[in-house]
Image (spheres, rainbow, N blue to C red):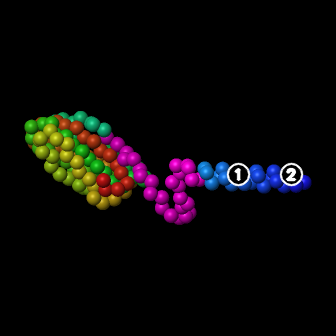
């Protein structure tokens, strides 16, 4: 009986040592999170229009903001010889204007951000110029302003 007791104690001590060694040498940086505590997990931006070419005097591109995303980043590269203007509208091309601006004809990328959280739904990016325009458009969605 004494040998059985010694064996049980030896197994328990060995298990405790193994657990301690594992805890001190693992790369785990996890921590306990309360059930209602928000978890800060970065969300990868969602690209909804990628390097889309446009040309002419007017263009419209539609995109959808799904649940979980609230901010829009729009990038233009104007490869034409004249500036053009853009507008982002909610729901239709004549819906509520979210933002607008002018993109210079310098061949560089110009990026614009929504500064307020947007609701889910369809949005439209419209570009126009009195002269013929050409360039590319990127639209991505995020969970924060940048």
Q: Is 32 included in the stretch rendered in magenta? A: yes
Q: Position of residue 63 (x, y in %)?
A: 33, 45
Residue assigned mark 2: 3
133 left or right of 115 in image: left
Give the residue displayed 26% in from the left and 47% down from the top: 74
The residue lying at 22 percent from left, 38 percent from top is: 136
Q: Find the distance from the CA under tag 1 to the CA under tag 2.
A: 18 Å
The residue nearer to you, when weighing 48 against 20, is 20
Residue 69 vs residue 129, the one in the foreground: 69
Q: Residue at x 53, y 51 (%)?
A: 28
Q: Position of residue 96 (x, y in %)?
A: 27, 56
> Does 47 appear above or below 94?
above
Q: Secondary structure at mark 1?
A: helix
Q: How many marks?
A: 2
Residue 131 on the magenta span: no
Within 10 Å of the Cα at label 1, are there few (<14), some (14-19), or many (20+) other Cα atoms?
few
Is residue 54 visible in the rendered image? The answer is yes
What is the x, y in percent for residue 78? Answer: 16, 40
User: What residue would you read off at disc 1?
Assistant: 15
Instruction: Using residue 144 as the reference point, say whether residue 111 is left or right of it.
Output: left
Residue 60 is situated, as x and y percent measured from the top left of the image, at: 25, 42
Tell me the residue at 76%/51% (across/down). Answer: 11
Q: Which span of residues is magenta-colored?
A: 23-49
Corner quadrant of residue 82: top left
């Amino acid at each position: 009986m004494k040998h059985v007791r010694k064996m049980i104690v030896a197994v328990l001590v060995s298990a405790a040592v193994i657990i301690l060694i594992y805890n001190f040498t693992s790369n785990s940086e996890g921590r306990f999170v309360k059930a209602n505590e928000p978890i800060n997990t970065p969300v990868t931006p969602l690209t909804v229009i990628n390097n889309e070419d446009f040309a002419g005097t007017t263009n419209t591109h539609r995109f959808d903001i799904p649940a979980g995303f609230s901010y829009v980043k729009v990038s233009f590269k104007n490869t034409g010889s004249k500036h053009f203007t853009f507008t982002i509208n909610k729901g239709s091309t004549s819906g509520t204007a979210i933002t607008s601006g002018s993109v210079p004809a310098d061949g560089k990328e110009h990026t614009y951000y929504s500064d307020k959280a947007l609701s889910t739904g369809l949005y439209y990016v419209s570009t126009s110029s009195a002269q013929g325009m050409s360039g590319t458009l990127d639209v991505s969605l995020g969970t924060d302003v940048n």
